[in-house]
Image (spheres, grey):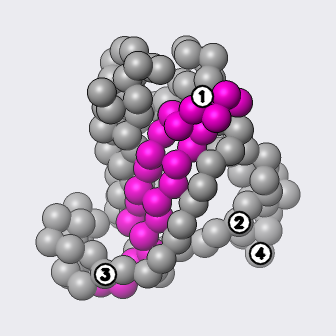
């Protein structure tokens, strides 16, 4: 059974800019719902608590407009432009561990990929995004 984890993403814990929802296979990660994802990274929990390392997957990014629920959570008007991302993340055994979807307000969207597969932007990527 999948477990749903909702990640509101904010700037300085004030302004909501994105909503990420991850669906995790409980068969691979029993008890994952007991973790505090306000303070823990999902990728770090999967690696540290379950020995699961995400090594690949698929990602699709498209353009959308926020619906009523998303508008309420993001504190914007319904129909505000946003990016919609869907992804499937797999471990080294090619098992799908996570399905995620996110809605990010278009005026706060940046994308960079260093192809490391660990879900963490390295210093080089972070510097590039700030430039």
Mark 2 burial class by Cα count in 10 Å: few <14, some 14-19, many 20+: few
Is 83 on the left or on the right of 92, as rendered? left
Nearest to N terminus: mark 1 or mark 2: 1
Mark 1 highlights which residue? Answer: 44
Q: Which residue is mark 2?
A: 112
Q: Which residue is mark 3?
A: 65
The quarter of the displayed image where residue 112 is located: bottom right
| Image point (41%, 60%), residue name | 102
Q: Residues within 10 Å of mark 1 (few under 14, many from 20)?
A: some
Q: CA distance from mark 4 to mark 2?
A: 12 Å
Is tag 3's residue or tag 4's residue first in the polypeptide sequence?
A: 3
Q: Of helix, strand and loop, which one carries label 2? A: loop
- What is the magenta range? 80-104
Residue depicted at x 36% and y 57%:
19
Quadrant hosting residue 32: top left
Residue found at x 44% / y 46%: 99
Which label number is shown at residue 131? 4
Measured as percent of width and height from the top left, residue 81 is found at 36, 84
Where is 126 relative to 61, above or below?
Answer: above
User: Which mark is on residue 67?
Assistant: none
Q: CA distance from mark 1 to mark 4?
A: 27 Å
Residue nearest the observer in this picture, 5 or 58: 58
Between the C-alphas of marks 2 and 3, the distance is: 22 Å
The mark nearer the N terminus, 2 or 3, is 3
* Image coords of residue 33 (percent x, y): 33, 23
Helix or strand or loop: what does disc 4 sit on?
A: loop
Among numbered discs 3 and 1, the one appearing first in the sequence: 1
| Tag in front: 3 or 4 | 3
The CA span between labels 1 and 2 is 20 Å
């Amino acid at each position: 059974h999948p477990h749903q984890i909702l990640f509101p993403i904010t700037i300085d814990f004030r302004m909501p800019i994105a909503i990420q929802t991850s669906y995790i296979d409980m068969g691979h990660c029993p008890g994952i719902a007991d973790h505090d994802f306000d303070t823990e990274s999902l990728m770090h929990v999967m690696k540290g608590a379950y020995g699961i390392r995400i090594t690949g997957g698929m990602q699709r990014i498209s353009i959308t407009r926020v619906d009523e629920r998303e508008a309420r959570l993001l504190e914007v008007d319904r129909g505000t432009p946003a990016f919609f991302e869907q992804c499937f993340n797999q471990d080294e055994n090619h098992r799908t561990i996570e399905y995620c979807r996110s809605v990010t307000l278009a005026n706060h969207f940046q994308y960079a990929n260093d192809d490391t597969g660990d879900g963490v932007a390295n210093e080089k990527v972070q510097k590039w995004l700030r430039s």
